[in-house]
Image: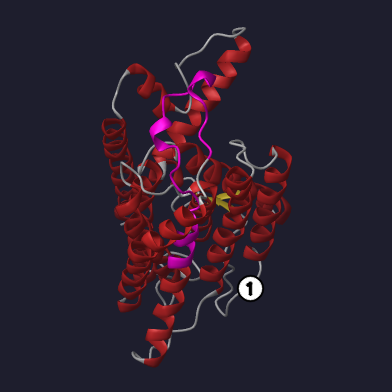
């Protein structure tokens, strides 16, 4: 358990002190996010022009350093027998880093080409698809001595359900989860600190879930109410590193933001959320734990769908949802805080459902 604290603490420190170092480098070379013009129908964000982007690189670095440093401490200082990185942990980190690289390319074009739309949609889609499919295929392999693979071919809610998809459909299902989650965080990342703060809460929930699953895993003759998860404690460690990295980064990303995470961060965080959900067997529970991301994504789906069906009419003044409230007249900080409250309530609801399922098994 100490390793979880070490991972979170190191990631927090790297995020807290590494972010200003990156800000100085980016400012020195004039690398800043391209901002859409107000006359394109977007809220007036002209004050954000010149703010450095690609802050997600610090988050990814902080997570990797926190994770591997905690295993180093466990092995050399604590002499723990569970000090080696697990396949599950490495898979989530690989998914996070792969999507982060796709996002980095997108941010690179935005910054150096000053094209606010970044990568071509086809290229970005291909990068996300390849990364997600590789993760899905690998997650169905690497069976341990208890016969468990990192992912299951069952659809899961809090545990595996009776719905079996089979290997091919499971990989497609995992791809859809990764695409939805990464794009959901990407859509949420439109106001200072919004996506980062919501991510902290969701990753904190996965720390608790991983620790609880580890304490009640199906080993040593325990069968009643136990969890069939391959590496729950290491997944909790990954979640702690992600939470710590986001906490440290949020110090600089809170309004007025000194840096944006860009697609480098939003795609990486969304991928990590999906990876944790798949490997902890809580796929459908992510709808509650990441409820704010779901609501904001739904606002875009509703807006686009209604616009096409109604011949040009809109449900919201603008989508994603946070920009609708900007155009209504809410201040940016007000929107962020209220959306954080919604995110916290949904995370609490998700954890409540998770625990209620355990109690109901009695």
Is 41 a magenta residue?
yes
The quarter of the rendered structure image containing the N terminus is: bottom left
Q: Which residues are magenta?
A: 34-62
Q: Position of residue 103 (x, y in %)?
A: 59, 50
Residue shown at 44%/76% (left/top)? 219
Residue 47, by quadrant, is top left
Left or right placement of residue 94 versus residue 351 in this view: right
* Residue 102 visible in the snapshot: yes
Q: In the figure, is residue 350 to the left or right of 42?
A: left
Residue on which disc 1 sits:
142
Name the residue nearer the viewer: 318 or 212: 318
Residue 81: quadrant of the picture: bottom left
Number of marks: 1
- Does residue 342 sit above or below 228 in this rendering? above
* Residue at disc 1, secondary structure: loop
Q: Position of residue 308 (x, y in %)?
A: 63, 14
Asked if residue 159 can be seen in this view, the reply is no
User: Residue drawn 50% across and 34% down?
Assistant: 35
Residue 41 drawn above or below residue 161: above
């Amino acid at each position: 358990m100490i390793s979880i604290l070490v991972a979170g603490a190191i990631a927090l420190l790297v995020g807290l002190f590494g972010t200003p170092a990156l800000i100085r480098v980016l400012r020195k070379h004039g690398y800043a996010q391209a901002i859409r013009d107000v006359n394109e129908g977007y809220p007036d964000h002209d004050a954000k022009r010149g703010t450095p982007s690609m802050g997600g690189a610090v988050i990814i670095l902080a997570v990797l350093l926190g994770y591997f440093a905690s295993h180093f401490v466990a092995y050399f200082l604590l002499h723990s027998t569970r000090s080696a990185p697990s396949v599950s942990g490495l898979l989530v980190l690989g998914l996070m880093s792969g999507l982060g690289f796709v996002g980095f390319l997108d941010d690179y074009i935005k910054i150096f080409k000053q094209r606010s739309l970044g990568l071509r949609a086809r290229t970005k889609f291909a990068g996300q698809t390849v990364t997600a499919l590789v993760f899905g295929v690998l997650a169905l392999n690497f069976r341990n001595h208890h016969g468990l693979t990192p992912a299951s071919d069952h659809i899961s809610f809090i545990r595996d359900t009776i719905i079996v998809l089979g290997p091919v459909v499971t990989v497609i299902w995992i791809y859809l989860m990764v695409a939805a989650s990464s794009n959901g965080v990407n859509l949420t990342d439109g106001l200072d600190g919004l996506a980062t703060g919501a991510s902290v809460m969701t990753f904190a929930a996965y720390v608790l879930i991983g620790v609880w699953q580890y304490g009640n895993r199906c080993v040593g003759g325990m069968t009643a109410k136990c969890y069939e998860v391959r590496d729950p404690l290491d997944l909790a460690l990954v979640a702690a590193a992600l939470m710590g990295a986001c906490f440290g980064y949020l110090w600089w990303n809170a309004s007025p933001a000194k840096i944006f995470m860009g697609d480098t961060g939003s795609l990486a965080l969304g991928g990590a959320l999906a990876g944790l959900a798949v490997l902890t067997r809580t796929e459908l529970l992510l709808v509650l734990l990441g409820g704010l991301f779901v609501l904001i994504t739904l606002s875009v789906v509703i807006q686009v769908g209604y616009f096409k069906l109604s011949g040009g009419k809109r449900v919201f003044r603008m989508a994603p949802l946070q920009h609708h409230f900007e155009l209504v007249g809410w201040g940016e900080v007000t929107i962020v805080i209220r959306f954080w409250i919604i995110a916290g309530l949904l995370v609490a609801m998700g954890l409540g459902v998770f625990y209620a399922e355990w109690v109901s098994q009695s």
